[in-house]
Image (cartoon, rainbow, N blue to C red):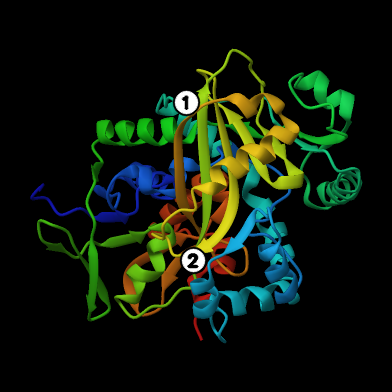
Amino acid sequence: MNAVKPEAVVVGGGFVGLHAAYRLHSLGLRVRVYTGGEIRRAASWGNAGIIHQGSITAVPEVMGLRKLLSLTLRRGSYVSIRPSFVFRELLPGGWLWRYVNEVKRGALAENAALLQQVLTESKRLWIEVIKELNLEADLNENGSIEVFTVQKNFEFESEFRSKESEELGYTVKTLRGDECRSLVPELSREVVGGLLYPDDVHINPSKTITSFIRALRGMGVEVLEDRVTLTHSDGSVTAADSEGRMTPDHLIVCSGAWTRELMRSVGIDLPVVAGRGYLAVTEAIRERFGRPIIYADNRVIIGQTASGEVRLTSVFELASPDAEPDTSKFERIRGWASEALPLVRGLKFVDTWVGPRPCTPDGAPIVGTIRGLRNVVIATGGCRLGATLSSSMGLMVAEVVSGKERALVSRLSPERFRS
């Protein structure tokens, strides 16, 4: 191991951790990143890849516990909850208990408006980093299209997004079914309408994260496929890896759905759980969609790499980060996606993946310091908006470290979950 002590240690090698490392390095700090093992474990690897500019909900917003449970029990639902999760998290103070109460008091809607403030910045920062570091990202700036095959869903969402876009300041255009097919001819004749988000951009997440790590290493940032354990004494937290122990000036915890377990080891319990997503990647095809497709009725995002593979992402599964996957869901996702894009029916899967997205009960990420731990900054909880928010979260970390914390960070502070 390098004998020179790193001034900043970043625990977590997903997009938040990598953006934080990039920004801290730009401040002139010596930075070391621990990915926690193979980078494929990170939620960023299997992200849908849309840097979204509107319709901000990090976790599904449903009204009340009864509706949530009925949704999870409905055959074919994209939301599911493992029984062990319910038993563990439904008690007062648990994640489900907090989530239901946050929905009742309107916190998810409030935080959607809050997060909308950083979306333009997030997109700008992402594009800057991709171009400055010459990342291999398959960057696509053609926007995204959300399509519907159920008329009542289309009517409700188009009216809702039209009003919301005026309030929150993003751009959305309502399209008839034939207008959707003029943009993406491969769409089903069953598509009755859609919403075009022209300001969205799309990346290939697995390609981007690999390229990002390579670029950081080229800049002198250490990126290690190692895990760390934490201990604390006298108000500072020490990290230990396979080579030894260190107490860095700044310890940045960006460990996603594993943040809760890691921080419990130093006496801090943050309500961050795994809302797991499923990804299936098909063989390459000749057809090019031009932009990612969000099939709203079944919550499937259909992306495409520059070489033609189709990426199908869906499911919000509340479970342990390391629970065994339900492999039947890959074919279920194919079935959902084929309703909007029939050509995926016969395509061969060349890769499948399940990953844990870090979710908070109030739909907002966590960024900030922990009372009583002077060298720790937490940055996690992007959930289904992890890629979208990661560039801004990385910048916020650097601002906290440099003492130039913006007012927004007080709203995202981990202290909001501590009694």
Which residue occupies the extreme top position in the image? Answer: 286
Vertical comparison of 237 with 3: above or below: below
Dot 1 falls on a residue whose secondary structure is helix
Residue ID for mark 1: 131
Residue 349, image x, y percentages: 49, 30
- Residue drawn 39% across the image and 65% down it: 259
- Residue drawn 32% across the image and 72% down it: 374
- Residue drawn 74% across the image and 63% down it: 109
Q: Around disc 2, counting alpha carbons within 10 Å, would you say few (fewer than 14), some (14 to 19), or many (20 or more)?
A: many
Q: Quadrant of residue 170?
A: top right
Q: CA distance from mark 2 to mark 1?
A: 33 Å
Residue 202, image x, y percentages: 59, 32
Vertical comparison of 380 with 284: above or below: below
Vertical comparison of 405 with 230: above or below: above
Residue 201, image x, y percentages: 62, 32
Residue 8, image x, y percentages: 27, 55
Dot 2 falls on a residue whose secondary structure is strand
Q: For the residues carrying marks 2 and 1, which lies nearer the camera in this image?
A: 2
Q: Around disc 1, counting alpha carbons within 10 Å, would you say few (fewer than 14), some (14 to 19), or many (20 or more)?
A: few
Q: Is residue 220 left or right of residue 392?
A: left
Residue ID for mark 2: 273
Q: Is residue 60 left or right of residue 264?
A: right
